[in-house]
Amino acid sequence: MCREEITERKPRERKPKTAEQALRSLMRLCARSEKSSGDALRLMSQWQVPQAERQGVLEKLLRDRFIDDSRYAEAYVREKSRLSGWGARKIAMQLRQKGVAQDIIAEALKQLDDDVELPRLVEKLRRKIRTTKYSSDYELRGKLLRYALSLGFDYDMAQRAVEESLAEQDL
């Protein structure tokens, strides 16, 4: 019997990108979807762009408005609040991780309206009730409250939403 020798595949080594190549790549990426300055720096790090040249590439992208952290933060807040159902705390935390400045985050979060967010949260909790296993009303309240807090809503709003969703369920 003949045994074939198994060769291990080595991960493909990527050549480091030059600053010019990184600029062109980031321009293409930013033309397709919003990116933050933190995203751009992270990508340049992955592409092994020389440290000294990264800031120059970022400044060019900012100057030509391919990257605008304010625009990015506003779009991110809109998307995550409407589509993902996240609260302000979770959105702010994610934006901080993406390297967006705190003052820009605070400005972008101003577009959130409690009068719109509360009914959305109540609806999410109503759907959650249908799939939650519980043995007492107390246990259900705790699970719903933890769920609302995990979505990034503050305690007061989470509590109000839990009470509203349970009142409609006659629990």
Image (cartoon, grey):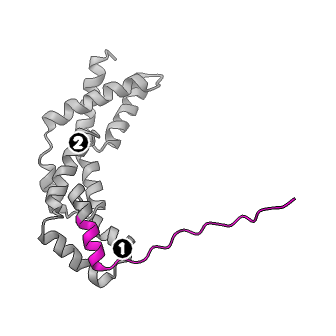
Q: Mark 2 points at which residue?
A: 81
Residue at the spot 30% in from the left edge and 75% down from the top edge: 21
Query: In the rendered structure, which amino acid carries the disc numbered 1?
Result: Ser
- 29 or 111: nearer the viewer: 29
Residue 104: in sight, yes or no?
A: yes
Residue 15 against residue 109 in the figure, above or below: below
Q: Percent from the top left, x then y, of residue 81?
A: 23, 42
Region rendered in magenta: 1-27
- 58 or 168: nearer the viewer: 58
Specify the quadrant that holds the C terminus.
top left
Magenta span contains residue 137:
no
Q: Which mark is residue 45?
A: 1
Q: Percent from the top left, x then y, of residue 137?
A: 40, 22
Residue at the spot 29% in from the left edge and 49% down from the top edge: 90
Query: In the rendered structure, which amino acid carries the disc numbered 2?
Result: Ser
Task: Give the label, 2 or 1, closer to the camera.
Answer: 1
Residue 60 against residue 118 in the figure, above or below: below
Residue 145 against residue 166 in the figure, above or below: below
- 24 or 96: nearer the viewer: 24
Residue at the spot 24% in from the left edge and 55% down from the top edge: 32
